[in-house]
Amino acid sequence: MPYQEVNGIRLRYETWGVGESPLLLLHGLGSSADDWFMQLPAFAPYFRCIAVDLRGHGLSDKPDGPYSVSLFAADVAGLLSALGATPAHVLGLSLGGMVAQQMGIVYPHLVRSLVLINTLPGIWPPDWHIVRLGLRRLAAPWRRRSMAEQAARVAADLFPRPQQSFLRAQVQARLAANDPEAYRKATLAVAGFRPGRNLRRLVCPVLIIAGEQDRVVPRLYQERLRQALPDAEFVLIPGVGHAGNVEAPDAVNAAVLAFLQRVEAR
């Protein structure tokens, strides 16, 4: 598996595809590039797909010091530049969607379009659901070294239905493998993300995809993102939760491909 040194750390990434246009895929909190196994085969015939483990995640380095969405964005911007993969379409889920927003704001010359899946424009001002969720995700790594209990809670939020037991077990195993301190710092990075009016500086085409039954990002935040980006296209996927790329890959892939092909045709 390839690595690239960026900002003094090694980032692990995977590349798929025969297309010329780069497509960067950014995972959610506690996840990795492996999240996109249902997307890469669909996108590979059309794009040069680059899936990366963010700092502190997966097989990338987990350095000391605080994390922030700005730092994540600087890392992946450096990766794209090192690979000669600019400008790129940038697709992000949850935390990855925050990093994508930051890239569009700070590195517009590197970004051709944004696809934001089940994400939010910062948590402030927070609602009670986000406060409760944040406390649950921060408390376990502080109390114990093991991520097992925390992984079980997150997996239950992502795949709550009985018929999703296989998916729930898979994501629980991946989350349990996280370094507790890196997970805590990434959670704090989410809490500290406040793009505010800077989102108005986005000049590239944007697609927002939301799961109708997302239990992680409430509808309130979906609406805030739409209000912050009034020119963005919007797709609501019925009956789907937070991990829509795994739960309903055909619907997500179709929406993403249709948008990207429209952008490519312009």
Image (cartoon, rainbow, N blue to C red):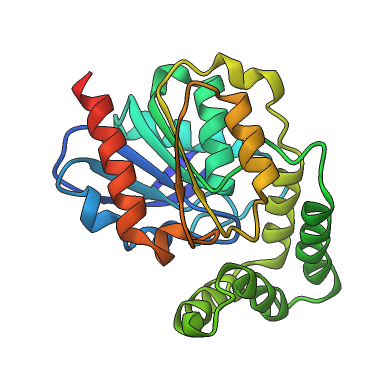
Quadrant of the rendered image containing residue 215: bottom right
Q: Position of residue 133 (x, y in %)?
A: 77, 60
The structure residue drawn at horizontal position 49% and vertical position 61%, both measured from the top left corner, is: 240
Q: Position of residue 56 (x, y in %)?
A: 60, 54
Instruction: Out of 264 and 210, give the one closest to the viewer.
Output: 210
What residue is drawn where x is 54% and y is 85%? 162
Where is residue 95 shown, x and y percent of the image?
Answer: 59, 47
Q: Position of residue 1 (x, y in %)?
A: 32, 59
| Whether residue 14 can be seen here | no
Q: Is residue 96 left or right of residue 25?
A: right
Residue at 59% x, 58% y: name it.
Answer: 214
Q: In the image, 98: left or right of 166? A: right
For the question of whether residue 254 can be seen, the reply is yes
100 or 215: which is nearer to us? 215
Which residue is nearer to you in this view: 266 or 101?
266
Q: Is residue 34 above or below residue 74?
A: below
Find residue 159 and report its image quarter. bottom right
Quadrant in which the C terminus is drawn = top left
Looking at the picture, tell me which residue is in the foreground, 137 or 183: 137
Residue at the outermost front position: 238
